[in-house]
Image (spheres, rainbow, N blue to C red):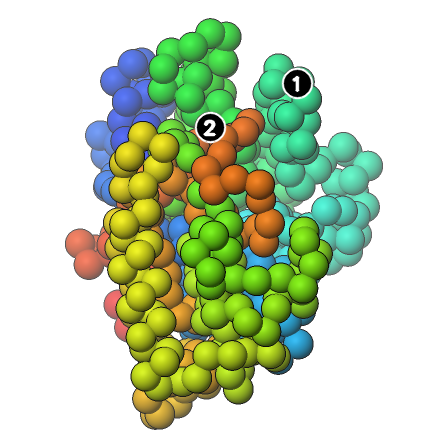
Amino acid sequence: MKEKQRLFILALDGTPFSLLNRLMDEGVMPNLRELVKTATFRELHSVQPPLSSVAWASFMTGGKPAQHGISGFVEREPRTMDWFVPKADRLKLPTVFQILSDRGKRVFSMNVPLTYPPFKVNGILISGFLNKDIGKGTYPPAVGAFLKAKGYVVDADIEMAKRDLQSFFNELWDVLEKRIEMMWHFYEQEAWDLFMTHIMETDRLHHIFWKYFAHDLPPFAEQFRRFYGRIDALIGKVQQKLSDDMALLMLSDHGFTELKYEVYLNRWLAENGYLYFEQVPPKSLKDLHAFSKAYSLYPGRIFIHLKGREKFGSVNSGVEYERLCQELSGKLLKLRDPQNKPVIKEVRRGYELYGIPPEAGNQMFTDPLRLGIVPDLLALPYKGYDLKGVLWHDRLFDRKVFSGTHTFVDAFVLGKGISIPDSVEAIPDIFKVIQSYFGIGKS
Ligand SMILES: [Zn+2]
């Protein structure tokens, strides 16, 4: 057997460890069943907050949000109260693709979230989630024109699910098929040391169709299984193509569970006298009234309206800040859903879970004025509650077309021909697994 030198990574966004086990037991995934007999296969944790942007940034860099700089889909600039969507150009740490490129390795990366705008690698980078136009989303640029001409798209249109579920399912299928077709095209054409494809369609499938599968509701319970049958066929082909010098790594970035309720935390803050707006409904964070004490961004990130940090902040650092953090935490833990079930399991200080921001240096990193993107509080819900961040909603609890939501636990990792030590617990640890495989850094 040749020495392992090349690595194939297949990423399934939001696919739970428990789901794969169930589908293997049901006979839906025979290829995976065969594969796990000779592979390491176990549960992996995500990162807080367990979102694709944040988790794949952790995968690529090994950092937590305060270190890699991505803390959610939306971020705010407290001095101006502008909000924006953080993209790859805000990453503060080098990615595994760049590190390997610098060492002369050939890299192929397809559809990994937070690789837009595309950056230079020694090979090909096809950006994923947060990019709308594949024609402008690749390195080198000519690859984008090629993919566009082939009908490749970055993501299925989830808005379609609000109009017609069957059309959305069909679209998911088509997007997946095209991605697989193009993946094999590059696999055959290109020389590479690291080849990675990310499948976003599993996450989309779960958001919309989870309840059908969970409760065995026709017609989508069967179609959900058929979708994973297609993923299993892909896994089978990947196995066939693995040569002796190649290892396989598969993983997801977070788990999934049935959505109980969307919870509109800014509604809760307003109802409890912590949040006021200049106009109703507010158009943006700039409409926050100076009287406001706190506001929230998705998911469960709570920022104190702090004097000296937020533009019109009213809360003083020190005793007032500490008292407010405690008061909010205590009240949030008492929040109950319409079935009288508790919603919030735990409220933590942001710096406890986000890592220490590098800008804090050797100073007390708990100084709220120095927290940067780290939220003052992070509300962690019980399974099934999605803590929304929109500023204005007409009710506190709601449910619409989405029927699944993310979990921190129950992601998975699978390795064949690559060592996954027991110390690997969460997605930021995978960075070291890849580095060790290629003989970089400490193992
Ligand atoms: Zn998702």
On screen, residue 370 versus residue 400, left or right, reads left
Extreme residue toward the left, this view = 422
> In x, y percent, where is residue 190?
62, 47
What residue is at 50 percent from the left and 50 percent from the top? Answer: 267
Q: Secondary structure at mark 1?
A: loop
Q: Which of these two is toward me, 66 or 423?
A: 66
Q: Which of these two is toward me, 144 or 207?
A: 207
Extreme residue toward the bottom, this view = 362
Q: Is mark 1 within 8 Å of ligand 1?
A: no
Say which amino acid is labelled 1. Answer: Asp
Query: Mark 2 or mark 1: which comes first in sequence?
Result: 1
Screen quadrant of the C terminus: bottom left
**Quarter-of-image position of residue 104:** bottom right
What residue is at 28 percent from the left and 31 percent from the top? Answer: 18
On screen, residue 429 versus residue 243, left or right, reads left
Screen quadrant of the N terminus: top left
**Quarter-of-image position of residue 80:** bottom right
Q: Which of these two is toward me, 372 or 129?
A: 372
Q: Is residue 137 above or below residue 170?
A: below
- For label 1, the crowd category at 10 Å Cα-Cα, with few meaning under 14, some 14 to 19 and many 20 or more, is few
- Reading the image, the residue beneath label 2 is 403
Q: Is residue 116 above or below residue 249?
A: below
Q: Is residue 364 above or below residue 344?
A: below
> In x, y percent, where is residue 118?
67, 60
What residue is at 75 percent from the left and 40 percent from the top? Answer: 147
**Quarter-of-image position of residue 365:** bottom left
Is residue 87 at all visible to an observer of this figure? Answer: no
Task: Give the number of the disc on residue 164.
Answer: 1
Q: Is mark 2 within 8 Å of ligand 1?
A: no
